[in-house]
Amino acid sequence: MDDEPIVRWYWIGDHLGYLGHLLADHAVIALLPVLIGLLLAVPLGLACARFPRLYQPLSAVFNIVYALPSLAVFVVLIPYTGLATQATVMIPLTFYALAVLLPTTVDGLRAVPDAVRQAATAMGYGPWHRLTSVELPAAVPYLIAGLRVAAVSSISLASVGALVGRGGLGYLFIDGFQRTFPTPIVAGIVLIAALALAVDVVLVVARRLLAPWAVREKGAGS
Amino acid sequence: MNWWNWLSDFFTSPDHRSGPDSILHRVSEHLLFSGEALLFATLLAVPLGLLIGYTGRGVTLVTAFAGAARALPTLGLVTLAVLLAGVGDTAVLIPLVALAAPPLLVAAVEGVRGTDPDVRDAARGIGLTHPQVLWQVCLPSAAPTLLAGFRTATVQVIATATVAAYVGLGGLGRYVMDGLATRQYAVTVGGALLVVLLAVAAQLFFSLLARFALPAGVRAQQRAH
């Protein structure tokens, strides 16, 4: 390690294709669970907003889920889902995403003022129509705020999957550590941060497109 | 695949009762890492966060920084720190501090900024200096937010300190990694279970703290809402 530089640029140049492959794998492993988490969080959140009694126990359960160490969960799943499979890493990540997204969804649905809800009903909106054109759009800024947190943590957590054989860019950490060669580790950290940043930018743009009023209100308020 | 047998094997094994690989020793190692990391993170992040929240300067920068720090993979930081600094406490502390500091920083900033501006003005009006306002008015009113930040940071640090074992350090991750390496499933699962128990205990501890240890005025205000 004494005369080994932190980054050997030629290694990166030689391995661009490999890095790209790991990056793509990482994106799938980390982001598909967030998407599935979102698809689960919306109906669950609707149920919780309608039946507040359901929300208390569910949020307690997800508080505990969020406390579970990812490595431990991966390991416990191996006998069921297999070593080095995507499922072993993606199933826990889905639950972590859900643990972040469920409270934000419920907050978003609760944030619709009663007057707005009643106005929609008075205008002749049925429950379904009111949900899709009033309540869900109003929850979009909250959902996107939750998605930003969930996506960033999922991207960072997925690398731990490398310890059970499937962690996308996380593999670079194992590789670099075993060879006492820091270049892949640095490349992995930078690519993971870049992926997180790119996803964050996409989500911020999505919020501007889907909920332009939220940006305006924030600007007017502060 | 019998969970009960696994766990009773794990907890009754003589190796796990005394000596360097005993459960008590591993738990105390784990808590020591986590505690040190939280202490350093607190010393770094909380004063800075209180100051930024009070002056309102650099809030956007701090929020962006904290978001970016969340993206840093702990496993990458641990392996890199070991290669650069050698196997030792520093190698675990740096990544864990990097993990714990952002939520604490954000909590301190948000907590102080959440203080009712009228209350702050009133405190100034009755002649309190800025440090007094920060210490006597803003800090107590930030306490619930700060406590929530501490809870997040503690739970994350306890859960993540497991990764330290990968680079040859102790703590409960030792069981998880060693069990995996020697295909002794009981050891891995036992270690994982202990981490979960510690994390849940930390959560409970902070919930109780939030219920009983907050300043009386803050609790009264929370009840009123």
Image (spheres, grey):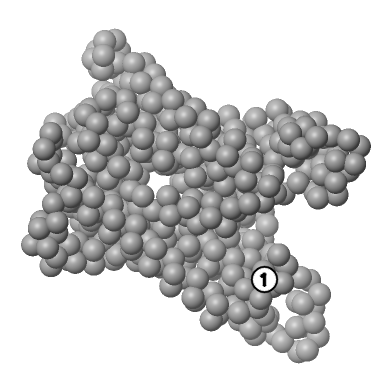
Residue B36 visible in the current orientation: yes
How packed is label 1: few (under 14 Cα within 10 Å), some, or many (20 or more)? Answer: few
Give the left or right position of residue B176, taking residue A58 as reference: left
Q: Is residue A147 placed above or below B7 in the rendered structure?
A: below
* x, y percent for residue B172: 32, 27
Furthest toward the right, the residue is B126
Residue B8 visible in the current orientation: no
Which quarter of the picture shows residue B208? top right
* x, y percent for residue B180: 19, 36
* x, y percent for residue A12: 14, 59
Give the left or right position of residue A21, taking residue B10 as reference: left
Question: Who is closer to the viewer here, B96 or B206?
Answer: B96
Q: Quadrant of the C terminus of chain A?
A: bottom right
Question: Who is closer to the viewer here, A56 or B204?
Answer: B204
Q: Quadrant of the N terminus of chain A?
A: top left
Name the residue: 76% across, 70% down.
A113
Question: Who is closer to the viewer here, A25 or B61?
Answer: B61
Give the left or right position of residue A197, taking residue A104 as reference: left
Q: Which secondary structure, mark 1?
A: helix
Name the residue: 45% across, 58% down.
A150
Give the left or right position of residue A157, taking residue A43 as reference: left
Furthest toward the top, the residue is B18
Which quarter of the picture shows residue A20? bottom left
* x, y percent for residue B170: 28, 24
Which residue is the site of mark 1?
A219
Total tally of numbered discs in the picture: 1
- Identity, as a three-letter code, of the amino acid under mark 1: Gly
Name the residue: 64% across, 40% down.
B50
Q: Is residue B197 placed above or below B27 in the rendered structure?
A: below
